[in-house]
Amino acid sequence: MSAASGLVRVGERLYVVADDENALGVFDLSNDGAGQRFRVFEGALPAGHPERKATKPDLEALTLLPAFPDHPFGALLAVGSGSRPTRLRAALVPLDNRGEIDGAARPVDLTPLLEPLRLHFPELNIEGAFVAPDRLCLLQRGNRATPVNACVTFTWPEVERWLCGAGPAPAAVSITRFDLGLLHGTPLCFTDGCALPDGGWVFCAAAEDTPDSYADGRCLGSAVGVVDAAGSVRALEALNLVCKVEGIDATLRGDRIDLLMVTDADDRDLPARLLSATLSLPPTS
């Protein structure tokens, strides 16, 4: 996979979504063998870059959902960015009691969930998703021209009913904006997030020199950080490696956070990287 944009770790299994694919990548962390592909949307995408970019589902986020009706062991939800009409789809992938895929993916129309957000973000670009206690959080990514980053939250029971067809798409209950500053003169903007047990969350962000949510630009680097349960950024550290990190998974181990991250080089000839890092848990005030 070349354009990895989100990941979820379940035990030693790593699920990766790419923004230019109709499939998930499934990898076993216990060995270095090749991964497998699991198709989430039907059809083939064009090979040429401009044509592929125009038609791809732009799956930019992947999150693990807790158990809910018809999904007793949870599910994966791969989320489109919403930045274009062709990018308003999600895929719901059921899991079994071992965290393995258990059945076909079900497409989900994100239009009723995401379209209302354009009132707040004309340059809508959802790049991260995670479930914290009783809420689904979506991360809006800014750009150089409009460096507006935000965490948009929905009540999880309402999202659950909507996914089950038992209720309408919920409205956002909160929108919290974040200023992540500059890296080498370019705004840092959210690319993914992952919940922590205490109600806080970790995030990754990239400094990509692009004026909008569609065009690719030169990436000047990436950073990782921590937002506490009150919604304040408590840590923000730039990575030494110059790359565009677009997916993150976090495991809390005592006073440290072990991170796994995946990258997108915006070049189908270059494979995505899997990176690891450790972040010290910031002290509470």
Image (spheres, rainbow, N blue to C red):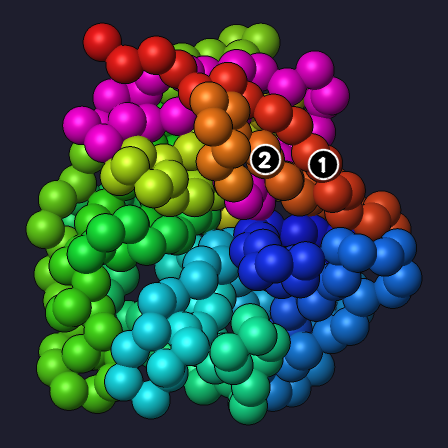
At 61% from the left and 25% from the top, the residue drawn is 278
At 58% from the left and 9% from the top, the residue drawn is 184
Q: Position of residue 30 (x, y in %)?
A: 79, 56
Q: Which mark is residue 135?
A: none
**Cβ atoms at labels 1 and 2 below 8 Å apart:** yes
Q: Quick one: 239 or 122, which is closer to the camera?
A: 239
At 52% from the left and 40% from the top, the residue drawn is 251
Residue 166 shown left or right of residue 227 in the figure: left
For the question of whether residue 118 can be seen, the reply is: no
* Quarter placement of the C terminus: top left
The span shown in magenta is: 224-250
Residue 51 shown left or right of residue 159 in the figure: right
The Cα atoms of the two marked residues, 1 and 2, are separated by 8 Å
Q: Quadrant of residue 24?
A: bottom right
Residue 193 shown left or right of residue 152 in the figure: right
Where is 198 relative to 133, above or below?
A: above
Label 1, residues with CA under 10 Å away: few <14, some 14-19, many ≥20 = few
Q: Quick one: 67 or 124, which is closer to the camera?
A: 67
Q: Which residue is mark 2?
A: 259
Q: For the residues carrying marks 1 and 2, which lies nearer the camera in this image?
A: 2
Residue kind at label 1, given as amino acid type: Leu
Q: Position of residue 248 (x, y in %)?
A: 55, 42
Q: Quick one: 256 or 61, which is closer to the camera?
A: 256
Where is 203 relative to 97, above or below?
A: above
Q: Which residue is mark 1?
A: 275
Q: Position of residue 58 (x, y in %)?
A: 54, 61
Residue kind at label 2, given as amino acid type: Leu
Residue 183 shown left or right of residue 260 in the figure: left
At 57% from the left and 60% from the top, the residue drawn is 10
